Image (cartoon, grey):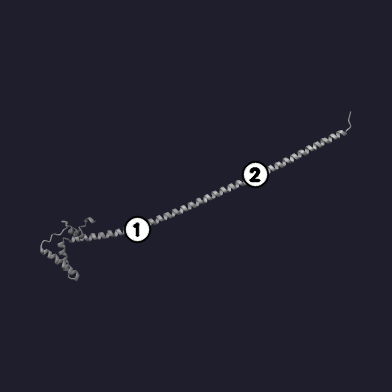
Amino acid sequence: MLAAVGPSAPAILLHRIGGDPAFSTPAISSQGQQQQLHQAQQQGEGASLEGGNNSNVDGAMMDIAEITGITSEQSEYFTKATDVMKQLRKLYFDQSRRLAVRISQLKKGRQQSQERMQRQQAIQQNYLQQTIQQLQQQHQQQQHQQQQQHQQQQQQQQQQQHQQNQQQQMANMQMAQGQDGAALLHGQLSLHQLHQPWSD
């Protein structure tokens, strides 16, 4: 769109200053042409200050256009280019505003993601700590139970040993008593035989 636009007024003025032959105005050789330019400028200034006759202003502008070489078509191109620049500027600011909003949303989303990750990490750490505590408690309970079972087994073994000792002692006493009874019986039998008369 901009490629179709002709040379703008600022460009023409720059070319005039720079001396570009494509856009430079014809050299004002005669003193009459210089006077016409001066008169046209004075007429334009006077009309703008006094708000005077439109025809004088139009005539002055036409004289300036003829002298400077800026045609109505070039002026129209300049107006169109100005409108395009305004539209581009508006588009630039709209895009900049949208980009700023998008960046803000991304920052907010990233912050929310970080907060969510931190919450998940805290939950996982709490779960691990609870699991470790439960395992430690279970291990301690198992050790306590094993110690209790070992103590009970030792007590049972001691009781069994004590019972066996008692039974052994009782058996020994009974055996001793039996031996004493047998000896006593044997002695009694011997005495009885001694008192019996001798037979042929």
Q: Dot 1, crowdedness within 10 Å: few (<14), some or many (≥20)?
A: few
Image quarter where the N terminus lies is bottom left
Residue 53 circle label: none
Can you name the residue that lies furthest to the top here?
200
Q: Residue at x 77, y 38 (%)?
A: 176
Q: Nearer the viewer, mark 2 or mark 1?
A: 2
Q: Quadrant of residue 182?
A: top right
Which residue occupies the foreground of this view, 103 or 154?
154
As helix, strand or loop, the secondary structure at mark 2 comes to helix
Looking at the rendered structure, the kind of residue marked 1 is Ala
Where in the figure is residue 111, as x and y percent of width and height? Answer: 41, 56
Q: Residue at x 25, y 59 (%)?
A: 85
Marks 2 and 1, how far apart at CA? 80 Å
Where in the figure is residue 20, as x and y percent of width and height? Answer: 17, 56
User: Which residue was labeled with disc 2?
Assistant: 154
Q: Quadrant of residue 156?
A: top right
Work out whether mark 2 precedes mark 1 in sequence or the reverse, and give the earlier one.
1
The answer to whether residue 57 is left or right of residue 95 is: left
User: Which residue was labeled with disc 1?
Assistant: 100
Q: Residue at x 16, y 64 (%)?
A: 64
Where in the figure is residue 24, as x and y percent of width and height? Answer: 16, 58
Q: Residue at x 67, y 43 (%)?
A: 158
Q: Are marks 2 and 1 in contact (CB under 8 Å)?
A: no
Looking at the rendered structure, the kind of residue marked 2 is Gln
The answer to whether residue 1 is left or right of residue 113 is: left
Q: Dot 2, crowdedness within 10 Å: few (<14), some or many (≥20)?
A: few
Q: Quadrant of residue 71?
A: bottom left
The answer to whether residue 1 is left or right of residue 198 is: left
Where in the figure is residue 66, as x and y percent of width and height? Answer: 15, 62
As helix, strand or loop, the secondary structure at mark 1 comes to helix
Q: Image height check: is 106 above or below 177?
A: below
Which residue occupies the foreground of this view, 57 or 153?
153
